[in-house]
Image (spheres, rainbow, N blue to C red):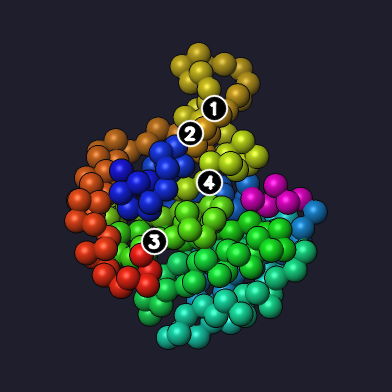
Amino acid sequence: MIAAGVLGVGDGEVVLSDSSSVNLFKLASAALDANPHRIVIVTDDDNFPTDRYVLEGLASARNLDLRVVRTDIDEGIDPARVASALGDDVALVCLSHVAYRSGAIADMVAITTAAHRVGALTLWDLCHSAGSVPVPLRESGADLAVGCTYKYLNAGPGAPAFLYVRRDLQQRLRQPIWGWFGQRDQFAMGAGYDPVESIGCFQVGTPPILGGYAALEGARITAEAGIQNLYPDQRLLP
């Protein structure tokens, strides 16, 4: 429901799992492991604080450079400034699609295109956009995304977050927290970790079932209403 009804992506590309911060750590770590010879993470100074903290921690632990682009609080992220910070040393670009303070909407298509031009992966925070504005994951070719369900998807505090991994990247990336919900034969209780070959490999432990039902119902209502009715600015619609 979240995949097709809210984000406009395919089945098997989104999974409910953990919190937004944990999912950001998992996907950022996987992206960095996929580009081990690159030494730079790019974000901006108006990104949501927990995102910046997670990226700062990863950069410190891995001895990488966290390159922070200045963003005007009211105008939002300038794609040209992001592009100027990119080079063949950049492994990951991690930004918020909608700014948490101003509501400014980033040009996901332009920024993702610029990142891909230098061979970097993109990770988008959708916490303030999923359920409120169109999210052009498919149109932009975005690689990775995380988001919560308790805000505009109305699932309430404590509801599980979600993560998105573009289908063609799912076999290339391996997340760092190897939990039993990502295991191929979960209840065999095997001695070694053997992840499933699907989006399920990005799960970790037992999900909150009641919170998950609230998240699915919030997504169902949003999908039924239609994002084009919730945010009728045709310039952002696919």
Distance from disc 3 to disc 4, alpha carbons, whole Å, reads 18 Å
Q: Amino acid at mark 4?
A: Arg
Visible residue check, residue 71: yes
Q: Position of residue 49 (x, y in %)?
A: 49, 69
Look at the picture and state if 48 lies above or below 156.
below
Label pair 1/2, CB-CB below 8 angstroms = yes
Q: Which residues are magenta?
A: 31-36
- Numbered mark located on residue 166 in the image: 4
Which quadrant holds residue 101? bottom left
User: Residue, x 57% and y 69% (percent of image)?
Assistant: 111
Q: Amino acid at mark 2?
A: Gly
Quickly name the residue at label 3.
Answer: 238
Q: Nearer the viewer, mark 1 or mark 4?
A: 4
Pointer 2 local density, CA inside 10 Å: few below 14, some 14–19, many at least 20: many
Q: From the viewer's perspective, tell me whether residue 178 is left or right of residue 227.
A: right
The prevailing secondary structure element of the residues shown in magenta is helix
Disc 2 target residue: 200
Q: Secondary structure at mark 4?
A: loop
> Which quarter shows the C terminus?
bottom left
The residue at which mark 1 appears reads as 196
Of callouts 2 and 3, the N-terminal one:
2
Q: Amino acid at mark 3?
A: Pro
Question: Which type of secondary structure does the marked residue at label 1 adopt?
Answer: loop
